[in-house]
Image (cartoon, rainbow, N blue to C red):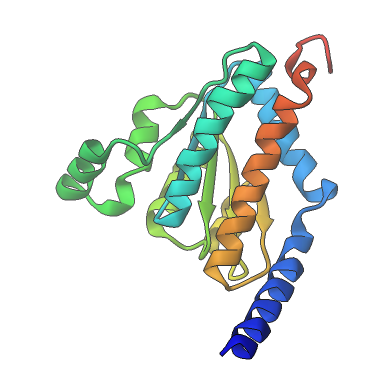
Amino acid sequence: MENQLENWLTEYLEKYNQALKVVTGEIILPIISKFVQSCKEEKQIFVFGNGGSASNASHFVTDFTKGAADAVGKKIRAISLNENVSLMTAISNDYAFEDVYSRQLANLAKPGDTVFTLSVSGNSPNLVKAVEWANENDLHSIALVGGKKGKLYDIAKQSVVVDSLHYGHVEDIHMLICHIITYAFMENPDIVDVSNN
C-alpha cells in the first residue's frame, strides 16, 4: 500500500509541477498591472466563481482588501460577488442561476471597473453571462481557467490557462496566482503610488 501511495504521490506532484509552468512573469505581470491600475484609479474589482473557485474568490478578496490594502496604505475596492447567499438564492429563484452575478454587476458596476472570475471548466453559464455583461458595459474582464479553456477563455479580455484537467491542481494554481497578486502589493507597497507610473 505504501508503494502504491508513493507512486501516486510522485505522479500527482509531477503533474502539478507541469501545470505550474503557466506561472511566469510574461503571463502574470500584465494581470498585476491591471490590478495596480484599478487601485490607482480607485476602480471597483468584482471577483466570483462557483464551488471551490467561489472559495478561492472569497479568500483572494479577504487577502487583497486586508493584507494588500494595509501594506499600501490605500483603500482597495474589491468585493466577492459569491458572499450574499440570500441575494444569490433570490436571483436564482426569481430569474435563473445563470443571472446571479450579471444581475449583481448591473446594480453595482460602473464603466472602467474590472471583473475577475475563476473557473476550472471555463464554461459555467453564470460566469460566462457575467463576463459578457461586463464586456458589453465597458468593464475590463480577467479569467483564470483550466485546461478545457471554455468560453471564458475566448471572451475575457485577459485570460490565464492552467493547462490541466485536474480540478485540484487548477484550483491550487489559481489560488497561487491570487496570492502572487496580493503579495505583489504587500511586498511592493509603492506600486500604487500615483506618481509611480
The N terminus lies in quadrant: bottom right
Residue 58 at what x, y percent from top left?
45, 40
Residue at 58% x, 70% y is 148
Q: Quadrant of residue 39?
A: top right
Residue 127 is left or right of residue 42, and the answer is: left
Residue 66 in view: yes
- The front one of 26 and 110 is 26
User: Which residue, as the protein is rendered here, is positioned at the far front?
Assistant: 2
Depth check, front residue: 164 or 43: 164
Image point 60% across, 19% down: which residue?
A: 69
Which residue is at 39% across, 37% downward?
81
The answer to whether residue 138 is seen in the rendering is no
Q: Which quadrant of the rendered structure holds the C terminus?
A: top right
Residue 52 versus residue 7 in the image, above or below: above
Residue 193 vertical placement versus 152 (above, below): above
How far across and how far down the image is residue 66, in percent?
Answer: 54, 23
* Count of marks overlaid on the render: 0
What x and y, as percent, mark residue 3?
A: 64, 89
Say whether residue 109 is left or right of residue 23: left
* Residue 127 in picture, x, y percent from top left: 44, 51
Name the residue at 70% across, 74% down: 15
Residue 51 placement, left or right of 93: right
Q: Quadrant of residue 14?
A: bottom right
Above or below, 67 against 127 in this view is above
Between residues 123 and 20, which one lies in front from this camera angle?
Answer: 20
